[in-house]
Amino acid sequence: MAHNKVIYGLYNDEEDLMRAVKVAKDQHLEIMDVYTPFPVHGLDPILGLSESRLHIAGFIYGMLGTLTAFLGMSWIFTKDWPVIFGGKPYWSVPAFIPITFELTVLFASIGMVVTFYVVSGLGPGVVNNYLDPRITDDKFCIAFDEHDLDASSAGSFFKETGASEVHEKSL
Amino acid sequence: MRTFEFNNRLRITLLVGIAIGLLCLGLTWFSASDDGFHSRFWSNVLHNSAFFTMISALAAFFLAASVTAWAGWYTVFKRVWESMGLFLVFGLIMMGLIGLSVYMGWNHLYHWNDAASVETDTILQGKKGFLNKGWYFFGTLVIVGAWFFFATRFRALSLQEEKEGAGDDFQVHRRLRFFAAAFLPIFGFTMCAVVWLWIMSVDAHWYSTLFAWYTGASAFVSMICLTILVLQYLRGKGYYQNVTVEHMHDLGKLLFAFSIFWTYLWFSQYMLIWYANVGEETGYFHTRINEYPVLFYGNLIINFLVPFFVLMRNDTKRKAGTLVFVASIVLLGHWIDYFQMVKPGVAHTAHELAAHDGGHHGADTKHLDAHDDHGHDAKGHSQGHDAKDHSHGHADHGHDAKDHSQGHDDHGHGDHGSFNIGFTIPGFLEIGTFLGYLSLFLFFVFSSLSRSTLTSENDPFIEESLHHHA
């Protein structure tokens, strides 16, 4: 990928982008990637992207949190350091539930954030190659790999679908 | 199809349902398992009337909240909530009749309504200012009457908006917003008051500051379940084609989220009482855990675990099958939730009053007969706990349930052990009564739906709703 040339067009509006993606799909053009400043509803099914598996990871992290909290507290309060609180039994399940809930949420959320950063190649100190800084602000971008589509047909596609700018860049 | 045709087939089916309900209520009255006070009959009437009144009130409330919040997603099917809110007219009639029966002393649902008990009971003395028949009867009439007034305003303004158009400055919608916003605080406070009167006060000694929230959350979830079921039925019949999977997805999210909210309240109420361990408060849970274990734990499984695990995934909220499955189960679950709020207290009151009437105040406090506590006719039993001893009395029941060798009078209805159909678990008569009330509710909702267009085309939010993406 390092030597590939990328041709990309910028759109001003998500509606324009959606229309352009549909046209590209109709013409069986191979899109390298699409970049938007915010999640655009309905774009994933048009691009034919499969459902994210992040939530499955989240569920597993959550269950880990549940088990950690519940088993941890059960061990601490019955085996490791039993203390009587307010005349209740050592193994007082109702008292464990709030903390179990909190750790479930904590594990699930932090786990999902870390997983997302790792999968997306983001993180502190990582240098990212992006096509154009404005795709994180107000521009919507479709990118083609030059191997899949040559510059002239890409240019005519962008012109036809109303892209505001067309650029080339070597990654 | 813009308007709903309430055809004869559906009409007859629902009328048969209503007839079954009436028949079951009649059978309950004459049933041998009912006691001399007709506790089973009256508690069934109270349980179902309160349940469906709360559902319709919550529909009106959520409509008002959505209008006030400038929400737009629900607009295509807002007629369903308007119709459910109008069912408050039946709420007014049913709860008014129960109020009248309490006022006239036709039943013994409430311990505080028995003058002799109140006189010797310091706790009930202290609550006399609120827990009295005047408050109950007139409070119910005024409060439910006010709710019904607002529900009719929502409906009338919505119909006016459709007829006259939204207008240049949305005059009609502004009026609707005014009424909706005014309803919210009124409903918030009065709902707590009626829930204390109707349901919490069957356990007259007990109180919980979370109870109104808990009951309200239960009714809200039931309301969402009924909305899902009604919409899915109508969509299956070819109506409401503009209600898409996106709207159903959002209803599924509400069902999921508010089931968790209900569990949160259930747990909060339980944990505070468990932790503080104040005798007056623990009696409530002691009775339910020891004598109603199926309902007590089943309640949590049906109303928390089922919606939580089934509706957790995105796709199960978008599939009609899973959504309808969960909605049906959870609706029944919250009906059971109300059942276990009402029944133990009524059974206990009947037991206590029967003991008073019998006049045999034996000295044997240890052998409290669990049989009595289930609301059987307990006349003539030796029964020795005075009103102040309430929570201790409770504590003993669970143990004695297994080995009460104490002779009890045979009134022909035998001993059901620790299970007592109609009290510790709903019997066929209860389920039949539920079907009757449900049919009445649906009959009313469908007939109001058939009297206007299904979608208000002039609502300012209609476009947003038609293009809703969850």
Image (cartoon, grey):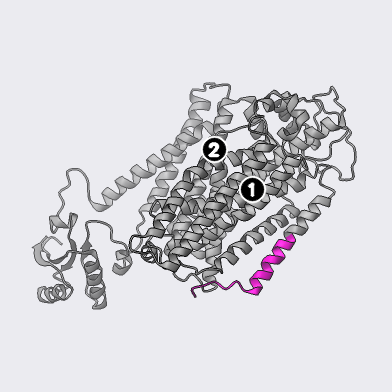
Relative depth, front residue between B66 and B209: B66
Which residue is pictured at 13% across the width and 67% down the height? A164
Q: Mark 1 sits on what residue?
A: B50
Q: Amino acid at mark 2?
A: Phe
Which residue is pictured at 73% across the width and 58% down the height? B21
Write down the quadrant of residue B16 in the picture: bottom right
> Chain letter of disc 2?
B
Image x and y of residue B415, in percent: 84, 42
> Chain letter of disc 1?
B
| Mark found first going from the N terminus, 1 or 2 | 1
- Helix, strand or loop at label 2? It is helix
Q: Which mark is residue A46?
A: none
Q: Answer whether labels 1 and 2 touch (C-beta < 8 Å).
A: no
Q: Is residue B171 above or below residue B381?
A: below
A134 to the left or right of B96: left
Residue B99 in the magenta stretch? The answer is no
B244 to the left or right of B351: left
- Helix, strand or loop at label 1? It is helix
Query: Which quadrant of the figure contains the C terminus of chain B?
Result: bottom left
Image x and y of residue B113, in percent: 73, 35
Magenta extent: B1-20
Q: Is residue B147 visible?
A: yes
Q: Amino acid at mark 1?
A: Ala
Q: Is residue B72 above or below residue B388?
A: below
Q: Mark 2 sits on what residue?
A: B267
Relative depth, front residue between B393 and A113: B393
